Each structure stands twice: as structure tokens, then as C-alpha cells.
Amino acid sequence: MAALGWLTPRRRSATARSVLAGEASAEAARKTARSDAPPHADEAAQEAHGTANGTGTHTTTAPGADGAHTTGTGAETAAEPAFPVPGDDLAAAFFDLDNTVMQGAAIFHFGRGLYKREFFRRRELARFAWQQAWFRLAGVEDPDHMQDARDSALSIVKGHKVSELMSIGEEIYDEYMAERIWPGTRALAQAHLDAGQKVWLVTAAPVETATIIARRLGLTGALGTVAESVDGVYTGRLVGEPLHGPAKAEAVRALAAAEDLDLARCAAYSDSHNDIPMLSLVGHPYAINPDTKLRKHARAHDWRLRDYRTGRKAVKVGVPAAAGVGALAGGAAAAIALHRRRK
């Protein structure tokens, strides 16, 4: 597998590669954005949201009354002006995906689905399983783990048609992702849609995967990592670098310029301190299920916080409530089973 570690230096400001990645992502997002407005969630999204709320139908909840553990420093009060502002077409919302909109990392679920379809061998599956287990336990993005997953994905899809992976991605969403959507964050996104605003996912996951998730949730579109393709076939290389950290901010900046948005009136949502550059761009930053560093930063800057995890331990270490002990035990059992088969 090609080593792409040099593409993602840690803790640095925007570079030429991150700007290129952001601009490429914004261009891809605009090309694939849904033309119907306002968008509506599909049956899977409605079912996931309704089930989590104890009903069989989709419900819309305003950001200030979504049942989250609100831990801000006074920003969320009864006197707070209505947000999002209905009819403000200069505003939009940008949502990180992994552990913000969805429990776990999209690229790991995608890898699991590809293994089921025999795109790669058991050895690679074991690595995907371990990375996902680590992600659930830590609740934060580790650049080394995320980079390794991207390296694996690039080598796996090289030579495959984009259309083939898009078709498979639809199936994988139904199999592994639909039930992992956080209903609280989904309600926040719906509030922006109901206000007539566009809502975009912003993620290091492949833009094709992110676009599928955005469409299935009824969102406007997605900004994601752009893998190079020639004549509709993946080359195994990236355009720029993975959409992570400063590259996300560059993508949001490029999209806002293309869409004539006023970033001071926009909102952004994320769980990770890696997304502080993106959150700092907008006038309405939200920390969702925040890691320790983001929580500290959000409190220091009086940003709004929402926590949809339940239980003190979940809040502390970032384990999604729906993952819980059962899911972790299941992951451990799967790892043990793989180990025994290999003996």
C-alpha cells in the first residue's frame, strides 16, 4: 500500500495542498448537490430519527429544545434569539460527520462493507475492526489511525469505477450507517433545512460516501476527500490531501464564496478539536459530543455545546451511548473470532 503519511502533517495551518483539497471538495460538492429545495429526509433517516425519539415518525426539534445535555456558559438561555433565522439565504450550516452526525467513522463502516463484498482480505478487515474499536473507545480522531484507514481505502479502490463504488456505497449505508445517525444532531440539521437554509456535511471521508449519506439524510450535499479518477476510474491518488483540519476550513471557505454565503451568519458543528479551524470561520460554532480539547476551547470562547451521549462515562471518554458495552463487546468478540480463524 502506498504510504501517504506525508500528505497530513499535524497541527499546521493551511498549505497549498489543503487549499487545493478544499477547492476540489467544494467544486465536487456543488456538482453533486441536490437541486430540489428544501430537501427532505428519506425513509431510512425518518425511521432512525423516529425510533430514537420513541415514535415511528420523523419529528423536528429546534436546536434549543433537542433534549441534549447542554453544557454551555450561558449561551443557551430562554432569552436567546431564535436560531437558525428563517429565510436567511446568506446562511448555511456545516456538519462534521464522524461522531457528530454519525456514531463512529464512515470510512471504517465503508471498509467493512467492502470486505463483505470481497474487495480485500481478512488481514485488512482485522485492521479496520481494530481502528473502529479504538475510535469508539477514544471518541476522537487520531490522524495516524485515520490516515492508515485512508491509505487502505485508496489501495482497495484503485482501478475500480466510481459508479461501482457509488452503487455499493448505497448498500453499505443501509447495512451499517443508517442506524448510527445521532437523532439530536439530525434534528439540528433539520432545523436549518426548515428555515430554508442549505446544510452540508464536511468530512475526511471520501466525497462519494459523504454525498450518499447527505442525500439519504435529505441534506443539501457534502464536502469530502476527493480521490483522483480518470475516465471514471480511481487512480489510487488524492486531489490535494485528505479533507482534515485546515483543509476542512478551506473547503467551507471555498464553498461559501461560490454560494455567496456570509460566514458570520453560518453555523458549524463538530465533535473534534481538529475542526477548530472550521468552527472558527463561522458566526455560530457548536461543539457536539465534544472531545476534551474542544470542550475546553468551546467554554473558553463561549461557544454553544450539545452532548447527545448519555451517562457520565460516555461524556468523559466519548463512547457513543448507542455503542455502549454491547457494541464494544461485539467488536471484541469479532476480533477474537478473526484471531481464532487465522490460527
Image (cartoon, rainbow, N blue to C red):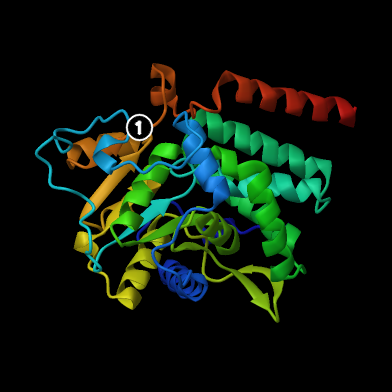
Q: Position of residue 175 (x, y in %)?
A: 68, 44
On-image quarter of the C terminus: top right
Which residue: 35% across, 60% down? 13
In the image, residue 308 sits, relative to residue 1, either above or below, namely above
Q: Describe the element under mark 1 as helix, strand or loop.
A: loop
Which residue: 63% across, 49% down? 173
Position of residue 143 in the picture relative to residue 196 (left or right): right
34 or 95, which is in the foreground?
A: 34
Res 14 seen here: no
Instruction: Give the residue at mark 1.
Output: 307
Residue type highlighted by circle 1: Asp
* Residue, far bottom: 231
Q: Position of residue 147 (x, y in %)?
A: 58, 51
On-image quarter of the N terminus: bottom right
Q: Position of residue 112 (x, y in %)?
A: 71, 44
Quadrant of the rendered structure where residue 326 is? top right
Res 139 seen here: yes
- Label 1: how many residues lie within 10 Å, few (<14), some (14-19) or many (20+)? many
Position of residue 337 in the picture relative to residue 142 (left or right): right
Which residue: 54% across, 41% down? 47
Which residue: 61% across, 31% down? 133
210 or 158, which is in the foreground?
A: 210
Q: Position of residue 155 (x, y in %)?
A: 73, 59
